[in-house]
Every structure is written in structure tokens, then in C-alpha cells.
Image (cartoon, helix red, strand yellow):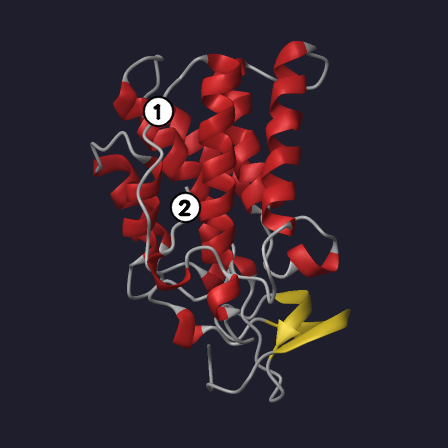
Amino acid sequence: MVCGAQLVYAATGASLACSACGKADTAHIHCPNGHYVCEECHGRDVLPLIEQILFTSRSRDPFEIAELAMSLPGLPMLGCEHAYIAGGALMAALRNDGSRDIGDGQIREVLTRTGKQAHGGYCGLSGVCGIAPAIGAVFSVLTGARCGTDEPQHITMEVVIRASRAIADLPGPSCCKAYVRAALAEAVGYLEERLGIALPRGSAVSCTASERHPHGCPGERCPSYAGRGMR
């Protein structure tokens, strides 16, 4: 993101200063020239644009909202900005659906919670993609789940497990955009199954980001490649 060199995805962290803000951090993703951009600076320019879409959209279709956000020209091909898109799009669609008392405050709460657990590269480093807890944050807000609750916490953990399984079942290399689509499909299905909320399931998409994938798009093995769709 600084000099255009191919990024290094390291197995162990290195102490580096963010090239944008100068903050020292333990970095697992950096370039061979020593450039590093911290999590806060990585999506600093595009996150306000994502929020604008979330707060102004009137669509009940979380897939439509997510695809619009993922089409933003400043959005990195990979990165935890996609976690904000997944959770935010689902919560925005629920607000627009009107079946529950949801406003912009609940969307902001989802984004805040997402930021606590969505960290770039940790899908590979710890096995947890930030999109899964973003979906969990939506269900937690909906059900009132918190530590010590019974059924609400069970519902929230179950949807995170389902989202994680859907992500893990996709072909590699990892792709945040495919992860968003797969996790939303699970979330929308579980919303209807468990909470009786029926949101649109979207329509087939034709991914336009294949050539941008730094690790190589899996091509026809991906469910959304060439418009085959995921829903």
C-alpha cells in the first residue's frame, strides 16, 4: 500500500512502525522494504465511505448493500474492512426491514464490536476471520447476548460457527469478498430459521475482482466466479 511491492505474510511478528502514523506495532503483514500500515490506518480512508453506504441505504437486501460497499474504488482487495461491510450490511438491512426496533445506533454498535476482533491476516494466523465475529455481533445486538446469558449467547455462538464453517469450506487462497458472501448467506438463513426474520437472499453475482487477487483467484472453483452465484 506504500511502495507497491508484493506483501510479505510472515509466520512470526516483527516490530515495525506504521508508515502512515508512526505508531510502533507487531506486524505480520508488511512489504520487503520494511513498509507497514497499521490496522487503524489501513482502512482509514474507505471506512467513512462504507459507513455512508450503511447509514443511507434503504435496501432490505444485505447482499445488495454489501456488494455496493465492496465496489468502492478505495477498498483494498483483502482486509478487515470486509468484516465491517458484512456485519454493517446485515444490520442495515435489518434496520430497513423494520421488523425489529433497530436504528443507526445499533449499526454503530456492530461496527464497534467488529473492530475489537477483526484484525488483518488473522484468518491465517489464528484461524478466525473477522467476518465471523462481525456476523456474531449482529446476532448479539439482536438477541441481547452478553457474557452470562443463556439462549441469546447460544444463538450468537451458533451463527458464528456456521459462518466460520461456510468460510472454511470455500476454496483457497483466502478471499475476503467470497467470505462476505458466504457468511451473509449463512446469517440470512439462520435469521429466518432461529428468529423468524426473512430477509432477501440476493441474486447471483459475477465477481469483478479476480484479477486483483494478490494470491491468485481460485477461478471456477469459487462459487461467485463468472456469475454462478452463492445464494
Q: Which residue is drawn at 58% across and 62% down?
A: 174
> Which residue of the protein is positioned furthest toward the right in this rendering?
12
| Disc on res. 94 | 1
Residue 109 locus on image (x, y percent): 46, 30
Q: How far apart are the two marked residues, 2 and 1, measured between alpha carbons?
A: 14 Å
When the figure is inspected, residue 13 is found, relative to residue 231, above or below; the finding is below
Instruction: Give SS at disc 1.
Output: helix
Check disc 2: other Cα within 10 Å, few if <14, some if 14-19, many if 20+.
many
| Disc on res. 151 | none
Check disc 1: other Cα within 10 Å, few if <14, some if 14-19, many if 20+.
many
Q: Residue at x 63, y 61 (%)?
A: 121
Q: Residue at x 51, y 41 (%)?
A: 183
When the figure is inspected, residue 126 is found, relative to residue 144, above or below; the finding is below
Q: Is residue 18 left or right of residue 147?
A: left
Residue 148 locus on image (x, y percent): 72, 13
Q: Quadrant of residue 97?
A: top left
Q: In this view, does 183 lie to the left or right of 172?
A: left
- The answer to the question of whether label 2 and label 1 lie on touching residues, with beta carbons closer than 8 A, is no
Q: Using the rendered image of the protein, determine whether residue 67 is visible from the camera's viewpoint.
A: yes
Q: Quadrant of residue 29?
A: bottom right
Q: Nearer the viewer, residue 48 or 4?
A: 4
Residue 59 locus on image (x, y percent): 23, 33
Q: Is residue 204 left or right of residue 216?
A: left
Q: Name the residue under label 2.
A: 85
Q: Which amino acid does label 1 sit on?
A: Leu
When the figure is inspected, residue 5 is found, relative to residue 228, above or below; the finding is below
Q: Which amino acid does label 2 sit on?
A: Ile
Instruction: Give SS at disc 2.
Output: helix
Q: Where is the C terminus found, in terms of image quarters?
A: top left
